[in-house]
Each structure stands twice: as C-alpha cells, then as structure tokens.
Image (spheres, helix red, strand yellow):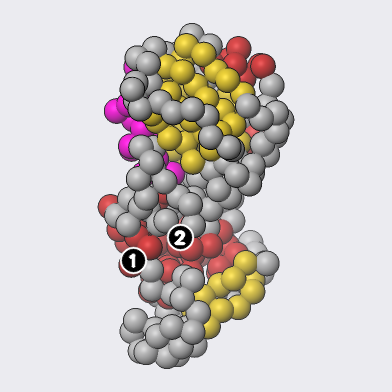
Amino acid sequence: MPELPEVETIARSLAPLLTGRRVRRLTLRATRLRKPLDSSLAEAVYGRRIEEVGRRGKYLLLHLDDGFTWIWHMGMSGCLVHQRLGETQAARKHDHVIAELDDGGRLVFNDPRRFGLSLVDRMATCGLFSAMGPELLDVQAFNGPYLASWRRRTGRNIKDVLMDQRVVAGLGNIYASEILFVCGLRPTRRLARMSRAACDAVVVAAREIISEAIEHRGTSVSDFLDGIGKPGGYQWRLRVYGRRGQACPRCGSAIKSVLISQRSSFYCPRCQK
Ligand SMILES: [Zn+2]
C-alpha cells in the first residue's frame, strides 16, 4: 500500500503536469471503489481548474479553484497516472476513473483491488482529516515530546502506534518496520514501556528514513508507480521489510517476521530489543 513517500512521489510527479489544468470530462468506468462513485463526482470536478497538487498523510490532494479539493487514496493497489496528449491509450482493465484535461492530457486511476478512494470535499470539514495526526515531517508537531506524550494514552505496541494515522499521518507497514529496525526496537515493544530517549530515537529515525525514501521516489514492492508510470527506487534499500530469512544488514542474523494486527512485521532478533 502506498505510504507517505509513495504518495509524495506521485504528488511531485503530477504537480507540473496538473497545476493550472482544467478538467474537461470525467469518465467513471466503475461504480464502486472503497466508496461508491457516481455522477456527483463528475459534476464536482467538471470545468474546475486544478490550482495545486498536495498531500496529507497517505491522501493525494488536487486543490480546485472553487475551494474544494479532489481527494484520492490509492488503497492497496491504486495508481494515478498522467498520460500526455499523444500518449493516451485505450482504457485498460481496472482503469476506473479517467479525467480528460484541457491540454489533451488525461489522468487515469487504475486500481485492480478497488480499495482506492476518489471524492471531492472541503479540507476544513472533511471527516477523513478531522482526527488525523500531524504530518511526520512537521518538526514542530511530530517530535520526541509529542510521541512520548502518547505513552500515557495507549497500551499498544510501538508498531501499531506508528501505523495509527491519529498519532502520525503517513506511515504504514513498510516504513514502520524499517524505522524500528534503525532504532533497534522490537515491533512488539509497548510504547508505554519506552524511555523518552527511545521516543526521540524513533522520531529521528522516522524523519531520516522517510526523507531518504522520498529522495529515492518511494518503494515499489508490488505495484507502486508514480504519476508518470515510473516505479520507485527505495525497494533496493529496505533493511528488513519483506526480507524474512535473509541476513540482517547489520549483524547477519536471519530476519524474522511476526504477525501484529494481521500484518507481517519484520525484525532482527539480535539487533532489535
Ligand atoms: Zn541484526
């Protein structure tokens, strides 16, 4: 599932192609993604100009010229890809939403598993964001004292806490695993039993890894593509995620995996305590 670095990569690749463009036509080829799609989406974006491309957590945002925002979530397998005039192709299987733009380009949302989301709403009042935690790269809001303050608020393990979008926005299974490896913490460690210094270390590692992953344009482990259809490059740098049985890059021990909240978490039994 695309996490913060992947969605940021999509946003950065789409920004120069979409900013200032008007939506000329919207075709819905499916009626159901995570939520039903209907003609109200087409009405909401018809003729609108895209003023800015942004991101909040794992959501891609196309801010429109009427104060509303076209909000996208890639779900498990969604790709939002721009095709230039002359590159436009016949619709493929799983192309569910096709927006034609005023320069002849198209924006195509392809999602085989259909957990993606596409809707238009006002950011200030949209329920998706009302309880969302701070952005991970927002130093003022997401820092050691902030994470430490959650110790009294939850009995959960650090892995689940990092993946909770109410605590911090943008992390999922891949980067939570990588962050905990870098700071030497077992994914099953309870946040409440972590020292203030350990909370600081998690925040520092999170910032480093996420910045590095954005620099490498995200991780393509299964099907992630950016806004021009290019895969990311961070999969070659993963330390533990998806590497069960392989050697730990630090100590050489075999990497293990454990199921936490129905998700496989990868860790080194020797380096992570
Ligand atoms: Zn190790």
Find the residue positioned furthest to the top.
Answer: 47
Q: For this view, does 144 lie left or right of residue 113? A: left
Asked whether 14 falls inside the magenta stretch, the response is yes
- SS for dot 2: loop
- SS for dot 1: helix
Q: CA distance from mark 1 to mark 2?
A: 9 Å
Mark 1 highlights which residue? 236
Q: Tell which circle, 1 or 2, labels the residue nearer the N-terminal end.
A: 2
- What amino acid type should be assigned to the residue bearing mark 2? Val
Q: How many marks?
A: 2
Mark 2 highlights which residue? 221
Q: Is mark 1 within 8 Å of ligand 1?
A: no
- Magenta span: 7-20
Residue 2 lies, in percent from the top left, at: 49, 50
Q: Is mark 2 within 8 Å of ligand 1?
A: no
Write down the quadrant of residue 131 in the picture: top right
Main structural element of the magenta stretch: helix, strand or loop? helix
Judge whether 27 appears above or below 190 on screen: above
Q: Give the camera-side residue of 133 and 175.
A: 175
Judge whether 246 appears above or below 191 on screen: below
Residue found at x 63% / y 61%: 153
Judge whether 244 appears above or below 46 on screen: below
Residue found at x 48% / y 63%: 174
Residue found at x 59% / y 16%: 42
